[in-house]
Amino acid sequence: MALLFLVAHSVCAFNDNFLRNWVNRVQTIYNSTDGNHTTEGAIFGDVYESAHILYLYSFLLSTLIVFALLRSVAFMFVCMCASNNLHSNLYTGVVATKMRFFHETSQGTILNRFSSDIKSVDQDLPIQFLDFLNAVFTVSFISLMVTTVNEWMIICTILTLVIFYYIKQWCLRTLRDIKRIEDSRRSPVYDHLKATMSGITTIRAFGVQNELKDHFDDLQDMHTAPSYIGMAGMRAFGFWLEIFVVLYVALVLLSFRLFLNEEYGGNVGFAVTQAISLTGIFQYGMRQWGALETRMTAVERILEYSNLEPEETIKKTMSAEWPIHGEISFNQVSVKYFEEEDLVLEGLSFDVGKREKIGIVGRTGAGKSTILAALLRLAYIERGKITIDGVDISHIPLSILRSNISILPQEPKLFAGTIRTNLDPFGIYQDNVLWSALENVELKTFIAKRPNGLQAMVDVGGMNFSAGERQLICFARAIIMRNKILVLDEATANVDSDTDKKIQSTLARCFGDCTVLTIAHRVETVINSDRILVLDKGRRVEFDHPYQLLRNKSGTFYKLASETKTFDNLLEIARQNFNRIDGNNLE
Ligand SMILES: Nc1ncnc2c1ncn2[C@@H]1O[C@H](COP(=O)(O)OP(=O)(O)OP(=O)(O)O)[C@@H](O)[C@H]1O
């Protein structure tokens, strides 16, 4: 690309020189006839040499156009590749980094990198870089050519360039810092906007639109203040450059008037037109250089996130069938979310056999959801070992581990798109598989009635579906995944009893041969489990069949159950379930 720039500008310089020599040659011939007008026609006839020179000059101009186009295409290609690479690296860096990053970094800051910084790299930087390169080559060639006509101008040129360099250094140091401040003040604007959009109903309900608008204006002012100073600074920089360029042009003109007795008009015209052409391009090029350097902070910020510490580096393949049984074992596991914080789970041990249905209960903050976080390696396992089908999960690549565990969280997550893309994001399954899953969660008729069936639109966050419908769609997704392990984290806490029943019956029907962990506050939700794990302050306090636990009147589970209004009913259900187990005949 650099070579194409050099060639294009060399051809341009060659063309200008060609023109100069042509004019000088006309003058020589004109002088040799002593200004005899009668021979003028002959002069031009000789000079044009039967239009050959015109053809040659046209050819040179065409060559210039070809090289200029080639240069632009090569430049566009290089910029596109660079921009693609920067975006891919940024995306990989952010997606693969540790969870801690997302706890510590606001969404606005991340959004800022993916929107404003990427826009700078996509749109602003290439234009500024192209203008800058053009200016550098143009100025270098003009200086060279002016010097060929008047060698004393080399001193002036070098002096002017040194002055420019110092002005640039002086201005840009400040402008770069201003740009950094401007960039960092954009994130709070995004944060505020995002928070406002998600809480718009609450804002309207409390009638605090004006307070939020004022706050937004303040944040916007904080952002536009450095932006305006930066723009004004850049203009001031251009203004001072322009003054020095005008001085330089004046020196070129004066040098011919005062010191040189130039014989050829072509040389004078050439030097003057070249020097004058510096006026616009030079200050514009320098301004673009300045803007380029300040905008490089966008690249700096993208690279910062591209090089975030990744969550894991394990590169290992697992058998496609893993896990076959879905047996889970926690062995003296101690877990914390951040290294400097206290343990959330302490020396927790329990084993879950294949196809077992385990309920996990405990008071708020007991560490129930942390078991799921540990299983997915979202939290930091300080001591102990968790195995699935005998394989230590710390040796399993995260993508494999997480894609083999289905989760049904309290807040169901739907993506903007269609029902189909929500059920099968990777487009792997046939329509009949998806319809069958929808039938299992009793949503088939509901979706089929929609105009586009599986292609029915889902709004951001699935807001055009009720909470229960969203949960059932997520459940259908879990059915399609056919994983051996399913974890329900308060999955039925926000749904009505009807949806709860649908989920429970689907669980029994579709997940009979899977290991199911059900995290719940309500004892009713887990009373049908094979065993219940009771947690308190991150420790296991009980782990047995619900009926056994309900018979222990000093136990934690008994206390939790006795707080409900349906204790007798719960006891009866647990007793019947216990009775059905081979060898447990309580009659
Ligand atoms: N992402 C997190 N980062 C830091 N600490 C966390 C995080 N999530 C949970 N904790 C802490 O871990 C402890 C256990 O939380 P956890 O969510 O596992 O409890 P829980 O039993 O599921 O509670 P609840 O029933 O209220 O959901 C709490 O003290 C909580 O503050």
Image (cartoon, rainbow, N blue to C red):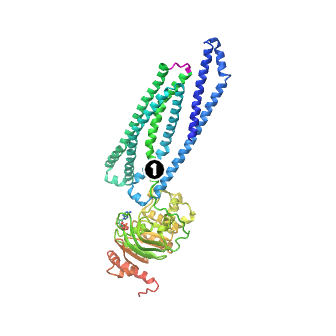
Q: Quadrant of residue 245?
A: top left
Which residue occupies 60% across, 36% down? Answer: 67
How many numbered marks, from 0 up? 1
Residue placed most toward the observer, 342 or 586: 342
**Residue 72 horizontal/vertical position (percent):** 56, 39
Asked whether residue 264 is drawn in magenta, I would say yes
Q: Residue furthest bottom?
A: 587
Which quadrant of the figure shows ligand 1?
A: bottom left
Instruction: Name the quadrant of the C terminus.
Output: bottom left
Residue 313 image offset from top left, x and y in percent? 49, 62
Image quadrant assignment for residue 548: bottom left
Q: Helix or strand or loop: what does disc 1 sit on?
A: helix
Asked if one can make out residue 106 in the rendered structure from this viewpoint, the answer is yes
Which residue is under mark 1?
302
**Range covered by the magenta-colored residues:** 260-265
Q: Is residue 239 left or right of residue 70?
A: left
